[in-house]
Amino acid sequence: MSMLQAEGVSRVLEGEVPVTLVRDIDVTFEAGEFCAITGPSGSGKSSLLYLLGLLDVPTEGRISIEDAATSSLPSDALADVRLGKLGFVFQFHFLLQEFTIRENVALPIRKLGRLAEPTALARAESLLEELGLGDKTRKYPHQLSGGERQRAAVARALANDPLIVLADEPTGNLDRRNGSIVFDIFERLAKEQGRTVITVTHDPSLAARAGRRITLVDGRIQEP
């Protein structure tokens, strides 16, 4: 099943000298697919990911989720789609320091508003347990290692049971062992849970573990 699709997508920053971030992107991602986006610095990898994740809007073309176009949705509807169907993991974990990691993971659940508070916290604890952090749920971010914080960020991305997980250089601040652990999680999410996982990475050894690899050069997908 087509889960996420870009059709003729370009993104241009207007100005005295326009800058093209990505150009003429046509790509489809299926349910249960684990895909790595690679390419040299400045090739448009993160720009493409932000477009796919509805964090940015194409200058041309359209993005569809489950065959439903998103380009005509108002901003509040786009926000609902991001919150309910997409999960995001970034290079920096962006955990809120004043909250425990259980509370951090529960924040998107609270915002979506579908679960009562005790259920939201119970789901947060369950996700953290799945990711090997069951004994850390009451700890604060500063009490965790870098790898543990990033796993907590993955748990937060899964809080609302998203169809699609998008990650932007999620291992960029991790050593090789912890980076491998994060990719182990991504593989399980795709293979065992049928989620679509798309990650930008500069690490070729990690990219090789994905079931599919897309290479960008100068904002375009480079054909193999």
Image: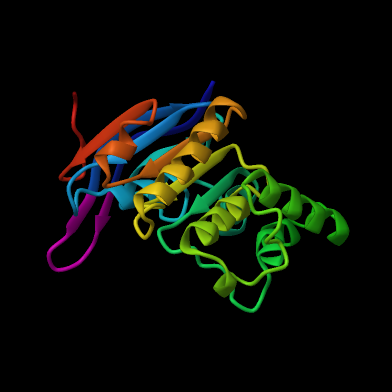
Q: Quadrant of the N terminus?
A: top right
Q: Left or right: 75 with respect to 109? A: left
**Residue range highlighted in magenta:** 11-21
Q: Residue furthest top?
A: 1
Looking at the image, which residue is at 61% across and 58% down? 76
Q: Quadrant of residue 192?
A: top right
Looking at the image, which residue is at 32% across and 52% down? 47
Q: How is the image coloured?
A: rainbow
Residue 2, horizontal then vertical, whole percent? 50, 24
Q: Quadrant of residue 205?
A: top left
Q: Quadrant of the C terminus?
A: top left
Looking at the image, which residue is at 61% across and 43% down? 85
Instruction: Work out whether 15 lies above or below 91.
Output: below
Q: Left or right: 31 with respect to 170? A: right
Q: Left or right: 126 with respect to 173? A: right
Q: Residue furthest left?
A: 17
Instruction: Work out whether 150 lies above or below 66.
Output: below
Nearer-the-camera pick, 156 or 146: 146
Residue 70, horizontal then vertical, whole percent? 51, 43
Magenta segment includes 56: no
Residue 156, horizontal then vertical, whole percent? 62, 55
User: Is residue 70 in sight in this rendering?
Assistant: no
User: Is residue 152 in sight in this rendering?
Assistant: yes
Q: What number of labels is visible?
A: 0
Looking at the image, which residue is at 55% across and 74% down? 142
Nearer-the-camera pick, 220 or 127: 127
Residue 46, horizontal then vertical, whole percent? 32, 52
Nearer-the-camera pick, 23 or 125: 125
Nearer-the-camera pick, 184 or 95: 184
